Amino acid sequence: MRLRKGISGETQKKQGVNLDKIGRKLCLNSLKTFLFLYMAEIRTRLREYYHSMGLKTDILGVVGVYPSFMGWSISYMIAAAKFHPLPVLLGGGLLFFMAVEYSLAMVSANSPPYDLGFVWTQSLHDVLMQRPALNTLLAAMNTVFVGMQTGYILWTWLVEGRARPTIAALFMFTCRGILGYTTQLPLPQEFLGSGVDFPVGNVSFFLFFSGHVAASVIASMDMKRMKRCHVASIFDTLNALQSVRLLATRGHYTIDLAAGLGAGWLFDSLAGKYEERKRSIVQKEDLEYDPVTNAQTILI
């Protein structure tokens, strides 16, 4: 008898679980049906409104309204998440930083800006502040690296006849000048200047965004396109070290460096689109581009 009672109890539990699943499924189907009917009613009302206004078409076109999410199932969403992991991670990041943004106390107007990069490089900043000679040496090395970037970009144009890096640099520095002049950010209070730094000497410069980082990205991306991967990896490493030094000397905020990284990629892409557009125009007009003389001659 006890065995039968135990078996019957387990059976009742299973039946209860099955009933719960069936109930949830029925509720979900009812919700889908309600949404479908609601959207159909909206479409009907819109069509009637457009007919009353004397219009022959409506904004929804001829395609029937059926929300995409109404066809989603649990297995579909799991498969979609596995196939598209990046949007899932970005969605998690969105929710996380929404919580951070609405729970974080604002920095007061009398306080200096809070920069996480400054916090991470505080020990290196203290070392450079105590050793001005080391700060000057690193500044000189950084200036040499800037010269390497500039030299490579000019080389691709003047020697190799490829103008894309130069066009990207012109895009970048023009936009940087506009943004830097429009919003002139204050220099960080603990800035460690040097007479051999670039811009040369202790002169004024725009903080947003970092031209050092953006120009390095432009040169590195061109190297990768030309299969100069070893040199590109060297430039990327030097760019990372340069970023650490700029944070340690308080020469740039972290947002300046991050925006410079994105700006280098963006303006390189814009320069590529510019070249493609000009190339298509040349082909349409039967023009030939001579990379040696940098001139366009009409085909006879």
Image: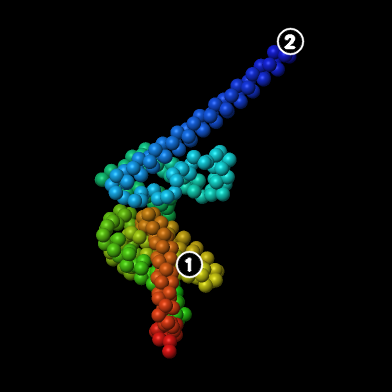
- How is the rendered protein coloured? rainbow
Answer left or right for 74 relative to 275: right
| Distance CA(mark 2)–CA(mark 1) | 79 Å
Image quadrant holding the N terminus, namely top right
Could you tell me which secondary element the residue under label 2 belongs to? loop
Q: Nearer the viewer, residue 287 or 247?
A: 287
Q: Amino acid at mark 2?
A: Met
Which residue bears the numbered disc 1? 221
- The residue depicted at 52 percent of the width and 41 percent of the height is 71
Which residue bears the numbered disc 2? 1
Do tag 2 and tag 1 residues touch (Cβ < 8 Å)?
A: no
Few, some or many residues within 10 Å of mark 1 (<14, 14–19, 20+): many
Tell me if I can see residue 57 in this picture: yes
- Residue 59 in picture, x, y percent from top left: 36, 49
- Residue 235 in picture, x, y percent from top left: 48, 67
- Above or below — where is 166 with respect to 257? below
- Residue 74 in picture, x, y percent from top left: 56, 38
Image quadrant holding the C terminus, namely bottom left
- The residue depicted at 64 percent of the width and 18 percent of the height is 12
Mark before the other along the chain sequence, 2 or 1: 2
Answer left or right for 238 relative to 209: right
Could you tell me which secondary element the residue under label 1 belongs to? helix
